[in-house]
Amino acid sequence: MAITLLTTDKNMTVQGNPLTGWTNLDVTVNFNAPAAGTVTLPAYPELMAQLVPGHRIVVIRDGAIWTAGPMEEPTNYRWSLDDPGVGVVDVNFSDDLATIAGYITWPEPSLTWAGQHGSTYRSFTATNAETIVRTLINENCGPGAITARRIPNLVLDTVAGAGTNTAISTRFEALLDVCRTVASAGGAIGFRTRQDGSQIKFGCYAPSDKTATARFSTGLGNLRSVAYSQSAPTVTHALVAGTETTGSSVRTYVEVANTSSASAWWRVEKYVDGGAANDTNGELTASGTSELTDGAAPVQLATVTVDTDTLRAGRDYGLGDKVAIALPHGLQLTDVVRSIHLQATPSDGEQVSSVIGSQDATSDPRIVRLVRTLNRRLGRLETR
């Protein structure tokens, strides 16, 4: 195990020496979502001096950056008479997607907040998904945003040429939620941030099919445990309704269906507020497609994997890639890597586990996922 922990300021300038004496490191990186990490440190004065608001944690694993981003809770300190030393401090951190997550989509991003117009939407029609995501990031918090909204040192990464055409209309919605919707409807592409020198680069990518090379099984010695479950879809027929135009009671209705899922299981209808007046530019269809992706028959496959010389997370497979799992009873499954969890201690070494499955596959409690969905829908209502 070769793990190095650094702190930097907002300009990626390293602060002090590498963090030493840590007793536990726990980091989960997520597909198209911010990471979540915690490190436990002795509360030495020289370490505490680095743990201040605005600073970042950089986790380097085997010479490559595993994750890098802001400290969300720099000093969660505790001490007791049972351990009369300097005490310990837990530092909670994320990656740089967490900073982007603090933004909403402005319908007219080139104007100030006071200059926004009440009924304007930021719309894209028949546009490549990568182009939409990059544009939304650039004009809301990147170098193309108004000065007050720019994230320091955030730039756009090289164009990957990923995704298919889709459509979206948005106003005052959570920026990353909109990006996820576009990425899902436009070819299931990925997006991420990465630290490169003194820059934070945001880019999109096309996940790879690694099922022929990224394989996990007891026979290969890289599978410690597996938990597998499959449940019925939550929607097979998205019934999308457009908004009523001013002075008219006419509404546009579009049905988007997953007939194969309905045939295998049963028909499950879901009403969807499309957020647009009509489907002229494909916005209502895109809303329905996104709902079908969210509600596909969830296959949840949680594994505990072991890195080997021939197969390592971050090197041989990554977030969004499709991999293969051979279950002990003979069934082989292939699906998408949704998150990768790195847990390490100096005494026990590191353990890597993955959550693999449909978009609904997650370690989050079901109520948490429900709250996120409700928040997204309420956001659409509030921005009308």
Image (cartoon, grey):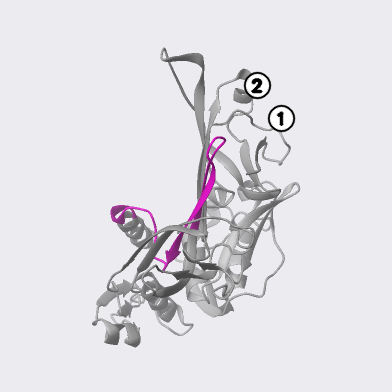
User: Which residue is painted at 60% across and 28% down in the image?
Assistant: 21
Which of the pair 200/322 is nearer the observer? 322
Residue 224, above or below 70: below
Taking the image as drawn, is residue 120 in sight?
no
Q: What residue sits right under mark 2 in the picture?
A: 46
Residue 17, above or below 201: above
Residue 318 position, x and y percent, is 58, 62
| Circle count | 2
| Residue found at the far right of this picture | 197
Q: Amino acid at mark 2?
A: Glu
Left or right: 352 as drawn, with respect to 329: right
Residue 57, above or below 354: above
Left or right: 346 as drawn, with respect to 155: left
Residue 87 position, x and y percent, is 50, 19
Q: Is residue 356 magenta?
A: yes
Taking the image as drawn, is residue 129 in sight?
yes
Secondary structure under tag 2 reads helix
Question: CA separation, marks 2 and 1?
Answer: 9 Å
User: Which residue is painted at 62% across and 72% down in the image?
Assistant: 131
Q: What residue sits right under mark 1 in the picture?
A: 17
Task: Point out the image quarter for the N terminus.
Answer: top right
Q: Kindly check if marks 2 and 1 are in contact, taking CB atoms under 8 A apart as contact.
A: yes
Secondary structure under tag 1 reads loop
Q: What segment is highlighted magenta in the picture?
A: 339-368
Q: Is residue 346 magenta?
A: yes
Q: Amino acid at mark 1?
A: Asn
